[in-house]
Amino acid sequence: MTFRLRTVSTTADGRRIVRDKVLDKAALTVGRLAENDIHLPDLAVEPSHARISLLPASRVAVEATGTLGFAVDGQTTRTASIDARTGAELRFGSTRIVIGEEEGAVLLTVEPVPDRSDVDPEKDGLALSAVLPGKRRLAWIFAALILALFLALPVASNLMRAPDLKQSKVVGDGAWTPGALSLAHHQLEGKCEACHVKPFEAVRNETCLSCHKSVHDHAPEARIALARAVPGLGGQILGSVAHAFGKEGSDSCVECHREHEGMTKMAAPAQQFCADCHGSLKDRLSDTKLGNAADFGTLHPEFAPAVVVDPANRTTRRVSLDQDPHENSGLAFPHKLHLDPRGGVAKMAATLAGDRGYGSKGLGCGDCHRPSEDGTRFKPITMERDCEACHSLVYDKFGTTFRKLRHGDVDQAIADLSVAGNTTQPLVTGRGRPGAYGADQLYFARFTRPVGGGLVAGMLGKDGVCGECHTATVKNGHPAVMPVTLPQRYMDKGWFDHSAHRQTPCAECHAAPGSSSSRDVLLPKLAECRECHVGDQAAGLFRPKDKVPSSCAMCHAYHPTGAAPMAARRVKR
């Protein structure tokens, strides 16, 4: 039997999203770490909390692997044996896992436990409206209280306080503060003059740059001025009012970075801020290579990844996916051959499953592509970890010791093979005397044809241990292989978080199972992303329930540094 993992999540508007995933494993791990099969981001769950294993006769064994237990149908325990046909409910922190059986597989339904009350105060007669005065009277009462507490009391306290202003405080003065600073500037709380150099004047750019010295402009100032659209009448009026209070204009830092909104991260800039320039950019900057972009769902250019065109010099060129680009990474790797569940690679992987952790049906994407520590990207592929289990570099055996070529060092590999099999024996036995040369010296000889050159040629040949995956070349008159250039990021102007898409099978976006050439660029096109993502313009009342609102700041940053943009966060789906 196999496991069928069904993840259920609920959106803010009460819509349920259900995703199924088949896991061909004999056991699943449950915990807070991202590498667990069932990842539960809950502080009440241990990093490695429990293991769920298959047993004969449709039974499942659940055992705790940490110090905490779990609940089975309301009873706390550390081990349990459950009949999937009967079913049971497991509780791990604020998540429940319901065990059942469906289509010959053990069904694990993972969903958060709802935390809301079913009591309706209006229906049960418990509402305050039954005993309070009318709304008009309450409005006048609260208006008088507000004026007394937040205006009259602070003014009176200020007029009557002691002459020593540093020791005395104004009662109710906190009501006039604009709000707490963000987490980034929280250490400046109470030091208004650090940012507001002049009273009642907006923070100016030079004040921000006095600390944030490494922040660079989005583009040259002259081009930004040409790219910016002329504001309408309403925008001109607002600009005049802002200018009266010392605000520098639409290109000021405070236009995006709004402060005094609470101890949290600064809010991402609104999509309209980007669309004001990029929505009709080509109309004002005819020489730009960027396409117009105002909304991801309605107006956005096709993705243009940076593909490798010359691996020797690590040269890349941005090409639109509409042009069906091909790259030259210097590596020959057919994904189809390695992912075919009925091919020879799958059979070899099945024999190594116990030692390497491969599945019984062959290789999967996760066997080579391992996520980074933060889950957003993937670690680089290495020969020793990801390839050598099948592509051995052993070339000789001496007793019980196997001699192996050094991957990545062609000169050393040639030197090793040049002496392979050339161990000689003396023509006559005996012990030579120190300093004995000429006729008295014992000479070594081999009467067979040298084999080193043939081994080197075979190593770099098309079907050789190197030539099978690499392209042979000549460097400074010596045999060599073309360097491999695998881009870690195809689109460095944007950001993509793989951890937010961990419930989606890789093949839904990357057509690797059908790719027979390493020249294929296995990236999804814009239309495929739009199957789930829409822009802010479609994120209103009539937004389709199965779409994710995606503003510009979800993938792009105004000051790109290679890090995640302000709005790049994990979206629970």
Image: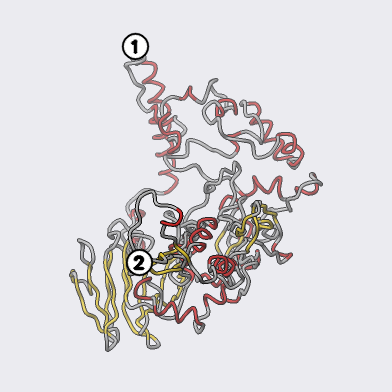
Q: Which label belongs to residue 440?
A: none
Residue 497 position (above or below residue 217):
below
Q: CA distance from mark 1 to mark 2?
A: 86 Å
Describe residue 532's horizontal placement relative to residue 53 as left or right.
right
Count of labels shown? 2
Describe residue 286's horizontal placement relative to residue 377 as left or right.
right
Q: Position of residue 430 (x, y in %)?
A: 33, 62
Q: Position of residue 357 (x, y in %)?
A: 37, 72
Residue 448 is at least partly visible in this image = yes
Residue 289 position (above or below residue 342):
above
User: Residue shown at 41%/79% (left/top)?
Assistant: 350
Contact between labelled residues 2 and 1, with CB atoms less than 8 Å apart: no
Residue 321 position (above or below residue 494):
below
Describe residue 199's horizontal placement relative to residue 252 as left or right.
left
Q: 130 or 294: nearer the eye?
A: 294
Q: Which label belongs to residue 401?
A: 2
Residue 13 is at least partly visible in this image = no
Q: Quadrant of residue 285?
A: top right
Q: Position of residue 425 (x, y in %)?
A: 41, 66
Q: Quadrant of residue 304?
A: bottom right
| Crowd band around label 1 with a 10 angstrom C-alpha radius: few (<14), some (14–19), many (20+) | few
Query: Which residue was labeled with disc 1?
Result: 164
What's the residue type where badge 2 is placed? Thr
Question: Which structural element holds mark 1?
Answer: loop
The quarter of the rendered structure image containing the N terminus is: bottom left
Q: 360 or 354: nearer the eye?
A: 354
